[in-house]
Every structure is written in C-alpha cells, then in structure tokens.
Amino acid sequence: MSSNSVTIDVTPKVPLIDEVIHIVVKGLSPCHHATLVCRVLENNARFFSTAIYRSDVNGVVDVSKMAALDGGSYEGVEPMGLIWSMSQEPGQKPGRRMMKSDVTTPLITHLYLLHGIIPSDECLSFIEDKNWLAYVTFGRLYMAEGVKRIEVQHGRLVGTLFIPAGQGPFPGVLDLFGSIGGIVEDRSSLLASRGVASLTLGHFQVGKDKVQYSDLEYFEEGVDYLLSNEKVIKPYIGVIGTSVGGERAAALSAYCPKVRVCVLINSHCLPCEYELRYHGKRLAFNHYDRDLVQYSDVGMITKYNYTRARAEKMNSIPVSVRSTTKCHIRSTD
C-alpha cells in the first residue's frame, strides 16, 4: 500500500456547520487498521478527536456506515463522531470553548489518516512529524449564501442582526449569551442560514467600556427593534438564551407579551449572581456561596449551593404565568 494511493473524500465540499458530512477513505489494503484524527484550531484554542477503523475487503472506510473500534474518542457507527467527540488538546487552560469569532469565514477542519492503531495520546506527535497516510482540510460555514449580517448600534442596543436570504418575512429570534461577554454570532448566523431572522444582543461586558445591562427594559428594546424590521414576522418573536442569557430569556418570557417561545440552554429560572431589574425593582435573586460551587474536571460549574435555600423559599422567575412555549436544554441531556 502506497500513501500516494490513499485518499480521504469529504462531502459536501463546503457544508453548513450543522450539516452531516460524509467521510470516505479509499486506497487502503483490505482489512487494514487505520486511525483518523480530526483537528480544529480556532482563536488560539485547539481541539481534536480520534477514531480507529478497519477497512473492508476493498480497502475502503466509510465513516457513515462502518463502526469505529474501541480505543478512540468514540466507538460504533457515528457519521459525525469525529466532530461531536472533539475535546481540548493537552497543554491548554481547561474549559476552552470552540467558538467562531468571525462567522463570515469557514471553520477550517483538518483530517488525518494514520497507519495502524494509534492511541489517542500519541496521535498528535505523529501529526507533528507529518507521519500520515493522507491529509485533507475542509471548511464548514456558519452563514449560508445570501444571509445578511448587519451590525446594530441603535440607542443603547449593541448587537448583530442576521437576515436570511429570500423575500421573507421570517420568524424572529432574540439570541442571548451569558457572562462570556461581548457579541457572540455563531448561533444567530446559523439560525439565519436556516430561515430565522436572529438578533444576537450584547448585554454583558459590551464594547470598550465593558458595559453590563441589568434592566429588562434593555432586552424589551431588543424585542421591539427586531420586530420593527420589515423582514420579521409580526407580532411575536422567540428568545433563546444560554447561561446568564437564559435567565434574561426566562424573564422576557414571563414579562414581555411579545415573546411567545423561550429556549433555555444550560440555564435556569433562579438568578444567582447577576441581578436583573424591571421598572426599577429587582426581580428574583438568590445568593450563594462561591466557595461551595462545584466544578467539573474541565472547570465547568456543575452545581450551585444556595446558602439561603435552607432558610427561605427560592426566588424564581415566574415563567408559568404566561402561556409561552418553553424548552429547557442541559448539556448532559
């Protein structure tokens, strides 16, 4: 078997970030063991995954149909296993996130094929030595062709609006991230690529002055701004929020009648660190002891220990007072 005869085919050639990709290796010897390594390097963060396969009698590995063997990042038939199983490469600060800072450019993914069964902790050294049978790169897009990206600075509002291609009008979504701060565009750009007008609204550590908005009126202004666009279906929108942004989204679903759908991701209805006010009054808020917060091995918060919970009723956002459609997603689901 010559390395020159081994190829890796990836289709479609330029998929959206959420599209299933088809990976096929050709030119291997029949019943040959090989290790696939997938890498992404973005914003000075590095992620990788590995998978071990045994080629068929024709020397082919079809990732969408064949089972990965034990010893890699996953096993079994997983067409997107090399993508979803990626974790941080060694030597980095724990808890880094794979986030695209410039959604107008593709996320470049590197795919390597190594000879034989290579343990995951040895794969990167093989790559550094360029000791591979085949190598290919491919890009995955956050913005479909025709999607419009519009930077927003309107009154107090700071964010980015993404409008799908076509005549519209389109359903609208207000997109809120958490204490990571700034303006995070990857989710909104992908929503627009799928036909949803989305405004990702900055509200935490925004701009050079690191402004933080803690009044619900600010988020209502975002709702009104989105609904004022001629491309957005009226009179209602949805809201999606992660972490602290989820707390803001939950409050909007409770107090803003123009919000009819609410999705919370890794969040809750029990504000516990960053207060939120409405008409000058503080909404639900719960104190907790930072020393009792529990963290996972990679530095993620897994449990809050509320110090007042033992003595008094928890203060939650009254999300049940209105007939809003709600979906609550946790990363362990």
Image (tube, rainbow, N blue to C red):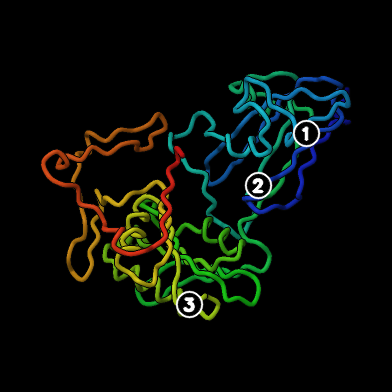
The circle on residue 62 is 1
Label 1's element?
A: strand
Real-space Cα distance between discs 3 and 2?
37 Å
Residue at which label 2 appears? 108
Q: Is residue 301 above or below residue 219?
A: above
Q: Residue at x 57, y 76 (%)?
A: 169
Q: Secondary structure at mark 2?
A: strand
Query: Residue 130 placed where, x, y %?
Result: 72, 28
Q: Quadrant of residue 22?
A: top right
Report if the CB atoms under discs 3 and 2 are less than 8 Å apart: no
Q: Is residue 220 left or right of residue 314?
A: right
Using the rendered image of the protein, determine whether residue 197 is visible from the camera's viewpoint: yes
**From mark 1 to mark 3, how far is it between C-alphas?**
46 Å
- Using a 10 Å C-alpha cutoff, classify the residue at mark 1 as few (fewer than 14 neighbours), some (14 to 19) or many (20 or more): many
Residue 108 place in picture, x, y as percent: 65, 47
Task: Kindly indicate the quadrant of the structure image that contains residue 93.
Answer: top left
Pick the front one: 239 or 293: 239
The mark closer to the camera, 3 or 2, is 3
Q: Outermost residue, front direction?
A: 323
Which residue is identified by label 3?
A: 234
- Amino acid at dot 3: Lys
* Kind of residue at disc 1: Asp
Label of residue 202 in the image: none
